Image: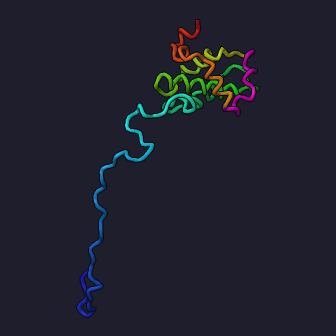
Amino acid sequence: MGQQPNVPLGIEDLPRATAHPGAPQRWSPDRPGDMLVPGDVPWGGAFGTPGPDTGYALRTLRGRTLPGGHHHRGDVEAAVATVMAARASKLGRAPVAGDVTAAIALLELDDATAGRLDGIGADHARLRELVAAIPADRIGLPLAQLRR
């Protein structure tokens, strides 16, 4: 809309230039704790073995029939999901459906032995001990070799 001729404009009424931020500077990892390469990521011991999307193990278990029936469902789910996540991270991938069968085989789990997992779902120390008890050379074996 044009300016009306009877309304005077002062310098304060004229448009002003606005400041724009400058281009961002290049980032460099110079803070303590910045990791430069994937090999810098802590591994083992209290750090565990990080793997991608380990929470998918729980989703994979949803709706599946597991040993122990309904009574032990939560504890068996926690144990199987933990072993699935450990197996998948050992293999450098996210958990897949085949890891359910592999985890049950690694735990040597059936309806009769599911009772030994009572309360393990709420005890993270026992879950870590459960995974630590599985031989490291066995956890990454193909399913066919686990069934022998």
Q: How many numbered marks are there?
A: 0
Q: From the viewer's perspective, is residue 40 above or below residue 117?
A: below
The quarter of the picture where the N terminus appears is: bottom left
Q: Nearer the viewer, residue 47 or 63?
A: 47
Q: Which residues are magenta?
A: 112-124
Q: Is residue 73 magenta?
A: no
The quarter of the picture where the C terminus appears is: top right
Q: From the viewer's perspective, is residue 20 above or below residue 87?
A: below
| Residue at position x 27%, y 77% in the image | 16
Residue 33 in the image: x percent, y percent?
Answer: 45, 43
Q: From the viewer's perspective, is residue 17 above or below residue 90?
A: below
The secondary structure that dominates the magenta segment is helix
Residue 54 in the image: x percent, y percent?
Answer: 54, 31
Residue 18 in the image: x percent, y percent?
Answer: 29, 71
Residue 117 in the image: x percent, y percent?
Answer: 72, 23
Q: Please indicate whether residue 96 sits to the left or right of residue 24 in the image.
A: right
